[in-house]
């Protein structure tokens, strides 16, 4: 990992305030990616708030986890894949579904809504947009609010994969 000093750095001032908010109000533990975000507290607060939403609030548990696994596979980030694999299983994703995601495909043992979500996620990862037909299909499945959440979860975890790659976490 690059910048290993952050693992033992005392978080004071604005960094400490963000760390206290994250561990106190959100009840989360600080891990290396979070500690690296803390190097720029204003960015950390915003990113970690979005991350909390993307990880714990948006969509339903299994839908979120399958998006996370799809993003990790797309960006070839084994660390994220390994960390989220047990959580994806806990969320109800089958081992077969995760193997298919790992191969770059769309699982066949998921709901029609989940299929639509993962197709949209893959398309966003590949070309950063949805065609009119893809958009209409996703809107029929999850509504406009759901589209916002699919994009937010896909986008947040793409940013996190870049963060992990940049700092070699």
Image: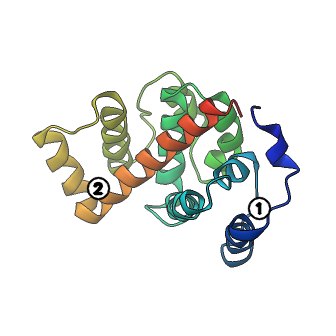
Crowdedness near tag 1: few (<14), some (14–19) or many (≥20) residues, C-alpha within 10 Å? few
Is residue 52 toward the left or the right of residue 87 in the image? left
Number of disc labels:
2
Is residue 144 toward the left or the right of residue 105 in the image? left
Direction front: furthest residue: 13
Alpha carbon distance from label 1 to label 2: 29 Å
Q: Which mark is residue 6?
A: none
For the N terminus, which image quadrant?
A: top right
**What residue is pinned by disc 1?**
29
Label 2: element kind: helix
Measuring 50% from the left and 30% from the top, which residue is drawn there? 101
Q: Nearer the viewer, mark 1 or mark 2?
A: 1
Quadrant location of residue 82?
Answer: top right
Q: Is residue 32 above or below residue 13?
A: above
Quadrant location of residue 144?
Answer: bottom left
The image position of residue 110, as x and y in percent, is 43, 43
Give whichever of 141, 35 is nearer the camera: 35
For the C terminus, which image quadrant?
A: top right
Direction left: furthest residue: 132
**What residue is pinned by disc 2?**
147
The image position of residue 10, as x and y in percent, is 85, 59
């Amino acid at each position: 990992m690059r910048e290993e000093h952050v693992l033992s750095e005392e978080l004071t001032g604005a960094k400490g305030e963000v760390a206290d908010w994250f561990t106190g109000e959100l009840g989360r533990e600080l891990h290396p990616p979070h500690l690296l975000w803390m190097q720029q507290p204003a960015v950390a607060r915003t990113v970690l708030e979005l991350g909390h939403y993307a990880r714990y609030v948006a969509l339903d548990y299994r839908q979120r986890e399958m998006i996370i696994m799809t993003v990790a596979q797309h960006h070839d980030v084994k660390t994220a894949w390994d960390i989220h694999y047990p959580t994806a299983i806990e969320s109800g994703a089958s081992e077969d579904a995760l193997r298919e995601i790992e191969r770059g495909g769309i699982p066949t043992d998921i709901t029609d809504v989940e299929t639509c979500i993962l197709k949209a996620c893959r398309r966003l990862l590949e070309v950063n947009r949805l065609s009119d037909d893809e958009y209409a299909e996703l809107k029929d499945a999850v509504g406009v609010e759901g589209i916002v959440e699919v994009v937010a979860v896909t986008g947040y975890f793409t940013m996190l994969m870049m963060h992990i790659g940049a700092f070699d976490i």
